[in-house]
Image (cartoon, grey):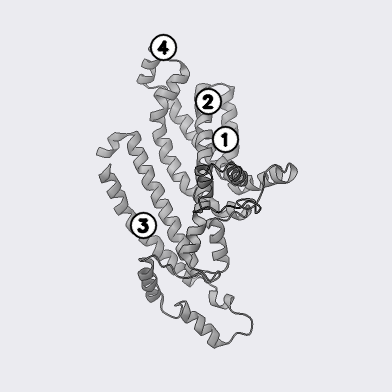
Amino acid sequence: MTRTLLSRLLQAVPTLAGVVVIVFVLVRVVPGNPIAMMLPPGASQADFDHLKALYGLDKSIPVQFLIWLRHAAIGDFGNSISMRSGVLGLVISRLPATLELAALAGAIAIVLGVLAAVAGARWRGRWPEAAIDAVTGFAQAVPDFIWALAAILVLGVLVPVLPISGRSDPSISLNYATQFQLIESVLRFDGHAFIDLMRHMILPALALALPFTAIITRVLKISLKEELTQDYVLLARVKGFGEWRVIVREALRNAAIPTATLTGVQLTFLIGGTVLIERIFSYPGIGNLAIDAVINRDLPMIQGLVLVFALMFIAINLMLDLVTVALNPRLSHG
């Protein structure tokens, strides 16, 4: 297990370095001038040159990168051009909201996906399996942003039972120590705040979770049906185990290995999907922050956010490898 962890960490270093270099160069060669967007009409060339020097954009790209890398190594990612504040502080203040949303969406998808897959395997070859296949096929075909718009229309406008924007009601005072507000509301036994936070998160989480649920269901159901043809399952039936026990206690663990691999890959797409979903629901996470940074050509913010997204993707893949080894210990000796 330790060797696997070290190996994956070493492999992640060139990946992270490549992403950082490519993004750093790209955001500087694409058309558009962030300094010109900051200045009011009629600003002089001296004003332009002053701001350009202030943000280090008057130097060559290699020199800019070395300067940024030296500061980034000590946690200084510069100041946001559009928000006039430290990039690291802004990202840290928004990141918990995105992590909680992604975690809730992932939990919903895994629970619904496993239940649907087990039900489909239990009633394989019968109408419940056909119904599950039809529903999951439709859920997978519809993009998450379409689900988001449909949820807003149905549950926010036609039948307004849930809020459609923000993270919490402005009338609720959340003087918490961290920005992990949902987790902290649980730890503080603050039921009123927890319910309000969940009400604001449920629609964006469902929009993210539905396509993910369909993928988990289809892959896990196929794996379960394959496992149910194995000899050890036949032996369990000979011993008198019921069908539910055979599926849940005997076949599910082995069937979960390929599903866990796919789930980890899809989690990266789910986090990427938060960018658009957060915008639609005006949810104050790093996805919404990323769109604002791109619109404003906020180079320091874009670089900081790309680094954060890359680190999250690497961490997810690392956890995926560890979970896969835990489910199948033989892989640790491969």
- Contact? badges 1 and 3 (CB < 8 Å): no
Q: Which residue is mark 3?
A: 15
Q: Which of the two discs, 2 and 1, sits closer to the camera?
A: 2
Q: How far across and how far down the image is residue 71, in percent? A: 38, 70
- The amino acid beneath tag 2 is Ala
Tally of numbered tags: 4
Q: Which mark is residue 136?
A: 1
Tell me the amino acid under the disc marked 1: Thr
Distance (Cα) linking label 4 and label 1? 32 Å
Label 3 sits on what residue type?
Thr
Report how far apart the C-alphas of labels 2 and 1 lie in the structure: 13 Å
- From mark 4 to mark 2, how far is it between C-alphas? 20 Å
Query: Residue sitting at 29 percent across and 34 percent down?
Result: 329
At mark 2, the secondary structure is helix
228, above or below 238, in the image:
below
The CA span between labels 1 and 3 is 34 Å
- In the rendered image, residue 119, in percent from the top left (x then y), is placed at 53, 25
Position of the N terminus, as image quadrant, is top left
The answer to which quarter of the image holds residue 245 is top left
Secondary structure under the numbered disc 3 in the rendered image: helix
Q: Is residue 79 above or below residue 148?
A: below
The front one of 30 and 293 is 293
State whether residue 149 appears in this view. yes
Q: Earlier in the sequence, mark 4 or mark 1?
A: 1
Residue bearing the label numbered 2: 119
Q: Position of residue 12 (x, y in %)?
A: 34, 54
Provide the residue designation for mark 4. 240
* Proximity of marks 2 and 1: CB atoms separated by less than 8 Å: no
Q: Nearer the viewer, residue 31 or 171?
A: 171
Whichever of labels 4 and 2 marks the residue nearer the N terminus, that label is 2
Label 3 or label 2, whichever comes before in sequence order: 3
